[in-house]
Structures are given as C-alpha cells and as structure tokens.
Amino acid sequence: MTDETIVDPPQPVVDVANVGDWNTLLESAVADPEGFWEAEAQELEWSKPWDKVLDRSDAPFFKWFTGARTNIVTNAVDRHLNTARRNKLALIWVGEDTSKVRTFSYFSLAREVEQMANILLSMGVRKGDVVTIYLPRIPELFFAMLACAKIGAVHSVVFAGYSSEALNQRIDGSESKVVITVDGSWINGKVFPMKQIVDDAVKFSPTVENVIVVRNTESEVTMDPTRDHWYHELCKLPIAKGRCETVQVDAEDPLFILYTSGSTGKPKGVVHTHGGYQVHLSATMKYCMDIHEEDRWWCTADPGWITGTSYVIYAPLLRGATTFMAEGSPVFPYPDVWWQLIEHYGINSMFTAPTAIRTLMRFGDAWVRKHDLSSLRILFSAGEPLNPEAWQWFHDVVGNGKCAVIDTWFQTETGAMQLTSLPTMPKKPGSAGKPIPGQEVAVVDEDGKEVPPGTDGFLVLKNPWPSMLRTLYKEPERYVDTYWSKYPGVYLTGDSARIDEDGYVWIIGRTDDVIKVSGHRIGTAEVETAVGSHPAVAECAAIGLPHEVKGNAIHMVVVLHTGYEPSKDLIADIRAHVAETLSPIAKPDTIDFVEKLPKTRSGKIMRRVLKARALGEDEGDLSTLDD
Ligand code: WTA
C-alpha cells in the first residue's frame, strides 16, 4: 500500500455513524471552533453556566468554560442515575484468570465511588490534595479515580509497571498524602509485588500519611499499622457508609496529574482539568469513537497512560456506555484470549495499540479465525504509527473486512485525540487521518514556516482545544518553554510528520529525546539515569532503534568504569537493574560497550551519531564532534 491507497469505510458503519457527513462537520467546526465546543458542552450538566467558552487573555495558559461549575463525576456517573442507565452496566471486568468476572451497573458504580470517597475524606483528603494511585487494571482503579474527582481531589495515576524509584519520584513530585495500591498484581500467572514497591517508594516520601491496600492476589505483604490499611476493612467501618456529595468545582480546577516523559530525567506532571476535558472526551467519544447506547466498548489501554485514563474510564462513562476492562495481557494464557473475550462479551468496538496488533499478528490468523467476532463494528488504534501491514491485518482478519479500522493520534498533553479518520471518512492506511472537528494542524520547518504538502517537518497544533494540558505541575515555565516557545502561538507536539495533498497527516516519529517502546513513552534521560546508577557504568547513552513488533527498542551504549569487563552476565545484570529501579518496560534490548561516547565540544552526547552507526547509515555532519 502507498500514500495513495484509499479504503472506503464499510457501508454498515457509515449507515449508523453519529458523525454523518464528515466534511460538513469539519468545515463548520473549523469555521467556529468555540461555537462547536460550546454546543458539545451543552450536552453535559453544569451547576453554573460559563461566562466565556475560551479565555485567551493569559495565553498560553488558556482557560475553557470560565466561570462554570461542574464535576466530571456529575456527568460520568451521577446524571445517569436519573435515567434508565441506572441499571445499565457501566463496567464489565474480567481478571487475568478469565473465570473471575465483576460487573457494575451505573448505580453500583456510584455506590462504590461514594464508599471510596468517604474513606478518602475520613483520611483528611480535601479539594486540591493529590492522591497517588498505583493500581493494576482492576475495578478499584475506577473507584479510586472517580472518588478523587468526586471530592475535588486530584489523582495521579502511576502505571503499575513502574518500580520503586520511579514511583517515589512521582509521589514526591506531587506531594501526595495518600497512596492507593494492592498487595500484588497478576502478570502472566505470577505476582508482581506492588505493595513491596510502595513500601520501598514511600520510605523516602515524607508527605505520605496513609496507604490504602486493596486485596487482589492474596499474597503476603507487610502492613505498617500506623500507615497502611486494608481497603476491605476500611469499607466495613461506619466512615465508609452513607451518601457522599459530588463537590461542584470550577471548570478550570485540576482533575488529574499524569506524569509523562520529556527530554530531561525529571518526568513532567501534565495537569488536566474538569470542564474542558469532559467536553472534549464526550465529543470525541460521540463523533470519532462513534459510541452508541447499546455498545460494549473495550479500550485495552492501561489507565496509567493517557489512552486508558481518557478512553477506558472517563470518555465511555461520560456517554453512559458500557466499558470493558481486562486485567491480563493479550497473549496469556493463549494468544486468543482477547478474541475469546470479544466473542464471549459481544464487544462492538475495540481500541488498542499497534504493538499489540503486531504481536498478535505474529501468532497467525488461526487463533483469530477460531472465534466469531461478528459483534465488532469499529477497530481503533493509538500510541504509535499503525503501519499499513498491521492496519491490513486488523482490517482483514480481526475485522473480517467488515469493520472500519481507525488510527487516532494524541498525547498525554492533548488529553484526547487530535487526529483521526472519522468513521465515515475514507481511510488511508498508515496515516493518522485529519484534525478532529475544531482543530487545525500544520507541518513547519526549523523557522516555523509551513512546508509544502508531502514535505517532512515539525507537527504543530494551531488551535487551543478544551482537553489541553493547562500547565506542568509546579513547573509553569517548563510548560511555556516545552510547548509554546519554539513557534509562538502554536503548540509544538514534538513529533515530525508530513501532510499529503488531501490533508491527511502522516506521523513519522518523535523529534525529541523520547522513545516510544510498545507505545509506552520513555525518556532517554530516564533510562540513562537508571543504567547510569549501576555500579559498573561510568557513562551511557540511550537511543531508539526500529523494532518489528515494539515499534522501537531501546539500544544502550555504555562506557564502563575501569575494573569492569563487558560480559553477558553484566548485560543481564544491567537490564535487571533497570527493571528494578525504573520499570521492566524500560529494559534496554541491546547493550554495546564502548571506550568513549561521541560528544560535542560542549559535552552533549551526539545520539544522532550513535543511531547512524547502529543502523549502518551515514553519520552526517561531524564538524561539531569533539573527538
Ligand atoms: C505517539 C499516547 C503515530 C506520538 C496517546 C506522540 C502516535 C506520542 C500516535 C504521545 C499515532 C500517539 N500515530 N504516533 N496514532 N499516537 N503517537 O503521551 O509520538 O503516551 O507524540 O500518548 O505518541 O505519547 P503519549
């Protein structure tokens, strides 16, 4: 397939699509973005209406729906209790052991959230306080996030695959008073000791007063009686019982912090708010994800990443949909577990990552063909480029040629999607589609000048959007510097891309020191800090190299301290050290030992040279190389 390949969406998808004529919608929304977003906001409940849709007076600190009062929980949970959705399933959860199933109607979800909220209140958590949530994909993750939002507290979900130092950094950065965790999580039949990791992380976190521990794996853990509490025991106490009001907050009050990787070793605390975020999610869930009242929706992402926070939890609930969550991985115990779940639970729309698609593709078609997947209508992907080959397999084999396959592009910072092919739009496999209604994008050169169609450059977003990050937690200057200073007036995505003659955007990759490994966003500086803290390592540099399944794999170039010799054992030891201190997902695939790293005269490591050498490509201009 080439850039010219165009695939029309299947007629049955077009017939029922919420979006109707995509061209008309895109044209009218871009002519009046604020009018578009205002109309979408009117579908939600606000206890006080807004004075202004968008306030640009303090740009780039944009404010949306100023003066309005609301709470995302009012819209994602409470309002459904006054309708027939009260008894509709909000959540279907299946454990890694798929015989374990838990379901919650909107009514029972509301009660669970109240209970968790009452407990947080009893621990002194108040509006604006930050709660760190370190939970695997279990229903309590929903309760915890929604409970924080309900009382106006700010949640900071840390991906359950991070290790103690990474967790400690994120707890300290947000000054959390409470951490919510589990005894352990299930990973391919084995227990990952999450409580132990929390113990190690909070040893050095003076702000943490209480740790709530959900019983999950029944594994042995150490409980500190002055700090740790079993969740199931707290639930029995009178403080957990009774109604808990959903606090009305300012539309611009923070809802959550999600730490993500940037170009330094210090993760960025991306801040999102209640008002604009809920509007943007609700609108994209309607037009882009095309959710219908009777749909069963499955986004396989983990809420430790933005795709999960936005499209597992908030967006489906905002539309009153039934969201599905699976605890396990796509290949355990067999590589057809996902297809089995789709068949058994009648999933209508699936949203997953290219790396998962490529992994499953390698196991062959037979695993898929064993199952009746005819309930599926639309298949989505996000997080990294969906290569045409994977697109085709997803379309032909999983979708059986009858489903629309849609790539979507967004970032932790954008909160919700910015590029997609609307369900009724012709698709170009390999492209991330066009800007969503109300958005405009451009590809610019080093000087900020728009380049002609088909030319590579830096991708920028031209219009503010309701679910945009508002700032970086406690680092407003870093927010301005990172996103708004290179090209004034537009948002710098950090991605390179090109736009073709038809206006479709083709993402090439990151232009900064971020590597997307299996869709996970990892900073080279974070990996270098982890590898560099190994006693044998004097100096090191991390680069991303193309990988057939993961998209990119981490390659490490290491200079050893004198007295250490390169060996297989040392490689294994360094990899284990990264898993332990940062995360198993950040383990380098390959490690090379060298005598010296290529540096500029000012001492900056020239990763470009390392990458060219690893790929056997031309090393380019070496005039700034010191030696
Ligand atoms: C990349 C993930 C190509 C991109 C939702 C972006 C993509 C980064 C796509 C953000 C896509 C995301 N095609 N690349 N459809 N979606 N990316 O914050 O490089 O974890 O800047 O958010 O993922 O990663 P993040």
Image (cartoon, rainbow, N blue to C red):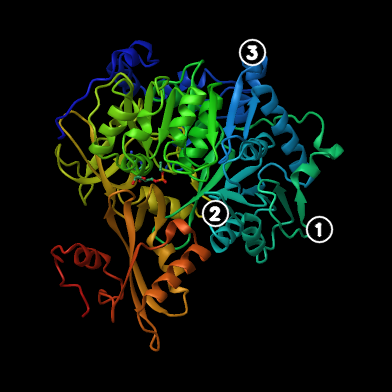
Report, in whole angstroms, how far the alpha carbon at label 3 lies from the one at label 2: 40 Å
Amino acid type assigned to the residue bearing label 1 in the image: Pro
| Residue pointed to by mark 2 | 474
**For the residue marked with disc 3, what is the amino acid?**
Thr
Please identify, in this view, whether the residue under mark 1 or under mark 3 is nearer the observer. Answer: 1
- What residue is disc 1 on? 225
Q: Nearer the viewer, mark 3 or mark 2?
A: 3
Give 467 or 293, whichever is nearer the viewer.
293
Which residue sits at x=67%, y=65%? 203
- Label located before the other in sequence (3 or 2): 3
Left or right: 559, with 324 as reference point: left
Identify the residue shown where x is 23% and y is 20%: 8
Q: Nearer the viewer, residue 322 or 175?
A: 322
Q: Find the residue positioned furthest to the bottom.
A: 563
**What percent of the width, then of the height, locates residue 64?**
49, 32
Number of the label disc, if any, that sits on residue 83:
3
Farthest-out residue, right? 238
Between the residue at mark 2 and the residue at mark 1, the CA separation in whole angstroms equals 32 Å
Number of residues whose C-alpha sits closer than 10 Å to that of mark 1, classed few (under 14), some (14–19) or many (20 or more): few
Instruction: Tell me which label, 2 or 1, sits earlier in the chain.
Output: 1
Q: Note whether 19 is above or below 559 in the view shown.
A: above
Q: Quadrant of the N terminus?
A: top left
Estimate the spatial distance between the alpha carbons at disc 1 and disc 3, rounded to whole Å.
Answer: 43 Å
Q: Position of residue 129 (x, y in %)?
A: 67, 47
Q: Quadrant of residue 287?
A: top left
Q: How many marks?
A: 3
SS label for mark 3: loop
* Residue 623, above or below 560: above
User: 504 or 581, which is in the foreground?
Assistant: 581
In the structure shown, which secondary structural element does the residue marked by tag 2 occupy? loop
Disc 1 secondary structure class: loop
